Image (cartoon, rainbow, N blue to C red):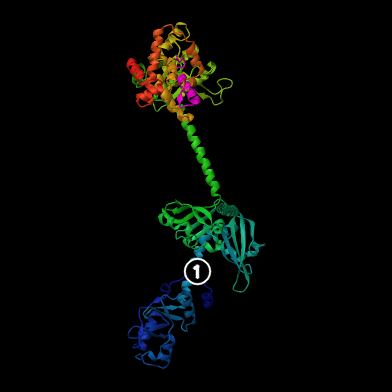
């Protein structure tokens, strides 16, 4: 029975170390030992065999209980030497002998005892069948306790029976499920508990702890029969495990689908660079099979991907384009990091439809550029676009006005800009904001004459949701909200209706207003700049403009002179417009013929600078000789000058002198001061040019 047990060591049993099983030696015999010494040691330690060593303490044999009987039978004296009676071929086992060999040697030993030796063949212990069996029983009970603990912790019920249905093992969880005790097991048959048992099937059955899943399996008994094992698990737990298994399977399928289709190619390695996953498309590109690459080093199979650099450096990279079999590809190399340690790398390979991808990126870039353009344009509409450099003039009045306006820009006072249409009132408003402390804040323009009167109030103040029929469902914020923190430019303020003037006055005074249909008071911080081409004083006297609003607006006032009051600026502005429009129109106009310039100076310019720019643009479009000639000017200008009667001849003479002076100056500029060429350009002699220059003080 002992041999059978030793041969059928339970599978999975922990290996036993020989030093923990053997009996350590306290004494030993030598080749000089006597019968008396041997008998004394065997009696003292109850040993069946005692190791015998030579003078160097090397094992040479064993003195056994049989040796002792032979010496007694021959009635030898106690002083007799033991050497003729020892076993000279003892069973010896090194300390590192495998467990299975220990069992075989001890079982085959005649005395059932083996001698354990160290590396120097010196005896250090004895190993007996009893020692091994005791150790095995101890280990078996330990494993049984561990198995019981595992089964109980996992909430599994377990039962084992032989081919006759006799139950040999049942854990405590199983006993609870069926309301049994260990004593009850001898009277209960496995087949009574599980009448429909068959191998490998899952079934449901009721127990004291609720419905359970039952799985049966079989094993071969020592008698050659077929025994049963039943494992019981809670249905809810089993269903959860089954669901988790299905989730894992589904995720696996999804991952495989993603790997095969989401990327052109993908490869994953461990920390050593061994390939764990390689997608079919990648294998196709490199003409290898999946079986060939798994477990191999990535630098051997896919050296072009250079994944080892990521494993060494731990920094994600995107490669330059490479080429293989005429196919261009790029690689996104990504380290896999866990607990600040690199545990692998992923290579995402892009090689399909790269042309289409590039086209998409080009379209995306174009869209982004377009969006940025519109954003910039929107930003420009809400910010000042002009500075003092845009106001071009040599007129002393304008120069003084610019200096005064620059000082006014530093404050917070309301500014009223007056002047005829086209004189540049809006440029002054922009420039004042650009040089103020609010230059980085919004600059909002409202043309009071361009917006219908019934919409002007909602445009200024905004409205709440459902404030009136046709209103935006989400409401709307007004210009005052948009200008908060910045400047609000009220152009053509003289065209505002009286009811709206009253509300405007409240905002100017209190910086507060109500949205249309709203009850919440809105506070704003806005600086006001107003402009008009109408005589506000006359409108006040006629009752068409509120006097209190007029005085509220007229804190700092500037009157911009008309173009006919600053004739000297006509040539300066014309040059500026020509330089600007040459780039826009694609023309190459270099100047203005004197005859044309004299007509321009004589013209009264009701549209002021705006009209001048329009005339220059038209003339440049029709000019054919690189210079603007009289024929290129609008017909209405020529006709106006023809029909204009000048009662005051002196005034006419002065005007012609001014025109002549401007023409000479223009000719000298075009010829870089060469008077001969200037005279030729003007169509007069050099002496006549000198006389005119002296007369006109040029």
Residue 573, x across and y down, in percent = 41, 22
Q: Quadrant of the N terminus?
A: bottom right
Q: Residue furthest right?
A: 196
Give the answer, above or below, for where 646 lies relative to 336. above
Q: Please tell me which residue lies in front, 14 or 304.
A: 304
The stretch in magenta equals: 603-628
Taking the image as drawn, is residue 391 in sight?
no
| Residue 617, x across and y down, in percent | 48, 24
Q: In the rendered view, tell whether residue 187 sits above or below residue 487.
A: below
Left or right: 567 with respect to 364? left
Q: Number of labelled discs?
A: 1
User: Where, by quadrant of the figure, is residue 38 drawn?
Assistant: bottom left
For residue 35, what is the image quadrant? bottom left
**Residue 438 lies within the magenta run:** no
| 512 in relation to 259, above or below | above
Q: Residue at x 49, y 16 (%)?
A: 638
Quarter of the image with the C terminus is top left
The residue pinned by badge 1 equals 13
Q: Position of residue 473 (x, y in %)?
A: 56, 25
Residue displayed at 49% across by 10% down: 643
Q: Residues within 10 Å of mark 1 (few under 14, many from 20)?
A: few
Identify the residue at horizontal 48%, vertical 72% (top origin).
136
- Rendered view: 509 above or below 66: above
């Amino acid at each position: 029975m002992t041999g059978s047990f030793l041969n059928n060591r339970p599978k999975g049993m922990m290996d036993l170390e020989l030093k923990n099983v053997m009996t350590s030696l306290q004494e030993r015999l030598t080749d000089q030992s006597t019968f008396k010494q041997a008998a004394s040691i065997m009696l003292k330690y109850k040993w069946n065999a005692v190791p015998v060593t030579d003078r160097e303490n090397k094992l040479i044999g064993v003195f056994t209980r049989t040796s002792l009987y032979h010496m007694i039978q021959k009635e030898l004296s106690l002083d007799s030497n033991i050497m003729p009676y020892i076993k000279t071929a003892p069973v010896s086992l090194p300390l590192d002998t495998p467990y299975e060999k220990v069992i075989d040697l001890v079982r085959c030993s005649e005395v059932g005892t083996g001698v354990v030796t160290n590396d120097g063949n010196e005896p250090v212990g004895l190993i007996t069948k009893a020692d091994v069996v005791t150790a095995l029983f101890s280990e078996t009970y330990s494993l049984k306790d561990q198995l019981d603990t595992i089964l109980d912790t996992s909430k599994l019920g377990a039962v084992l029976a032989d081919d006759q249905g006799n139950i040999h093992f049942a854990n405590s969880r199983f006993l609870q499920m069926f309301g049994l005790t260990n004593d009850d097991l001898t009277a209960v048959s496995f087949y009574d508990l599980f009448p429909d048992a068959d191998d490998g099937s899952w079934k449901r059955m009721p127990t004291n702890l609720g419905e359970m899943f039952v799985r049966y399996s079989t094993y071969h008994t020592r008698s050659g029969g077929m025994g049963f094992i039943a494992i019981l698990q809670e249905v809810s737990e089993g269903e959860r495990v089954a669901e988790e298994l299905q989730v894992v399977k589904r995720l696996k399928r999804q991952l495989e689908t993603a790997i095969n289709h989401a990327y052109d190619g993908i490869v994953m390695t461990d920390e050593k660079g061994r390939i764990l996953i390689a997608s079919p498309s990648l294998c196709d590109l490199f003409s290898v099979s999946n079986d060939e690459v798994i477990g191999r080093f990535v630098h051997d199979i896919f050296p072009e991907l250079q994944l080892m650099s990521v494993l060494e450096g731990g920094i994600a990279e995107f490669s330059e384009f490479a080429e293989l079999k005429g196919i261009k590809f790029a690689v996104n190399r990504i380290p896999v990091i866990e607990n600040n340690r690199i545990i692998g790398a992923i290579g995402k390979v892009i090689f399909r439809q790269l042309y289409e991808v590039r086209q998409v990126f080009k379209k995306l870039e174009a869209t982004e550029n377009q969006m940025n353009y519109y954003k910039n344009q929107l930003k420009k509409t809400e910010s000042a676009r002009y500075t003092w450099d845009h106001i071009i003039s040599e007129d002393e009045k304008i120069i003084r006005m610019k200096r005064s306006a620059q000082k006014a820009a530093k404050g917070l006072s309301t500014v009223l800009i007056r002047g005829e249409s086209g004189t540049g009132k809006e440029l002054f408003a922009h420039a004042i904001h650009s040089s103020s402390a609010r230059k980085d804040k919004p600059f909002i323009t409202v043309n009071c004459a361009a917006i219908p009167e019934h919409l002007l109030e909602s445009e200024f103040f905004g409205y709440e949701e459902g404030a009136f029929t046709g209103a935006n469902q989400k409401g709307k914020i007004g210009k005052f909200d948009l200008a908060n923190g910045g400047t609000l430019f009220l152009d053509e303020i003289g065209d505002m209706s009286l009811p709206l003037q009253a509300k405007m006055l409240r905002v100017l005074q209190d910086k507060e207003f109500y949205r249309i249909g709203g009850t919440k008071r809105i506070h704003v911080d806005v600086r006001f700049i107003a402009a008009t081409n109408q005589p506000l004083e006359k409108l006040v006297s006629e009752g068409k403009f509120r006097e209190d609003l007029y005085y509220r607006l007229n804190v700092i006032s500037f009157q911009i002179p008309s173009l006919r009051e600053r004739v000297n600026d006509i040539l300066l502005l014309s040059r500026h417009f020509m330089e600007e429009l040459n780039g826009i129109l694609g023309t190459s106009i270099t100047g203005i013929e004197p005859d044309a310039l004299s007509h321009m100076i004589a013209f009264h310019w009701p549209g002021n600078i705006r009209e001048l720019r329009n005339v220059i643009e038209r003339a440049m479009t029709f000019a054919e000789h690189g210079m603007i000639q009289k024929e290129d000017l609008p017909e209405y200008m020529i006709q106006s000058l023809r029909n204009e009667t000048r009662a005051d001849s002196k005034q006419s003479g002065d005007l012609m002198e001014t025109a002549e002076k401007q023409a000479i100056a223009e000719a000298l500029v075009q010829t870089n001061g060469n008077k001969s060429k200037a005279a030729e350009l003007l169509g007069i002699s050099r002496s006549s040019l000198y006389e005119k220059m002296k007369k006109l003080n040029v």
